Amino acid sequence: EVRLVESGGGLVQAGGSLRLSCAASGFTFADYAMSWVRRAPGKGLEWVSSINYNGDTTYYAEAMKGRITISRDNAKNTLNLLISSLKSEDTGVYYCAKGYMDYPADTGGEVAQHEYDYWGQGTQVTVSS
């Protein structure tokens, strides 16, 4: 059974940092691209960042570039996202999502559920101004 379990969310003041993690199990983690997707209150799913199967290629949403760093530890089956200089508009639920292939099929903009084959339950990030 594939499982993706996010952690690390919480309430943080604007300007602060958070490190989100996703623990993966039930599949060969090192074979697949992974992504972070978020849903802001009242909005649709928005792509944040992706990383290829071995971590040597990363992709970032233009609006967040420079403030986020995605990484993975294939030995520990863990995906991470470091977000710094948090803004109120970063508030939302952050999801870890498994890609279908070793490289992400698509990056950027709105995301549909079917673009990834497995999703975590999400972790809430709330930024207070």
Image (cartoon, rainbow, N blue to C red):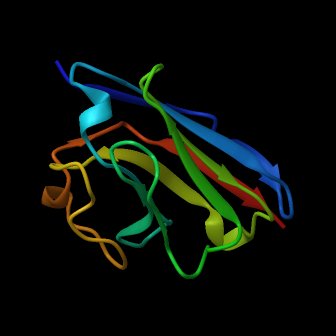
For the N terminus, which image quadrant?
Answer: top left
Look at the picture and state if 73 lies above or below 86: above
User: Could you say where residue 7 lies in the image, as x and y percent from the top left?
Assistant: 56, 31
Is residue 129 or residue 33 the one in the foreground? 33
User: Could you say where residue 40 lies in the image, as x and y percent from the top left?
Assistant: 50, 66
Is residue 74 or residue 86 the one in the foreground? 74
Q: Residue at x 60, y 41 (%)?
A: 20
Q: Is residue 114 left or right of residue 8?
A: left
Instruction: Find residue 21 and report its image quarter.
Output: top right
User: Could you say where residue 104 lies in the image, as x and y percent from the top left?
Assistant: 27, 60
Q: Is residue 84 left or right of residue 60?
A: right
Q: Is residue 125 left or right of residue 45?
A: right
User: Could you say where residue 4 lies in the image, as x and y percent from the top left?
Assistant: 35, 30
Q: Is residue 101 left or right of residue 97?
A: left
Q: Residue at x 46, y 52 (%)?
A: 56
Instruction: Find residue 108 and report its image quarter.
Output: bottom left
Q: Residue at x 40, y 69 (%)?
A: 46
Q: Residue at x 41, y 73 (%)?
A: 43
Look at the picture and state if 103 lies above or below 106: above
For the C terminus, which image quadrant?
Answer: bottom right
Residue 37 visible in the snapshot: no
Residue 11 visible in the snapshot: yes
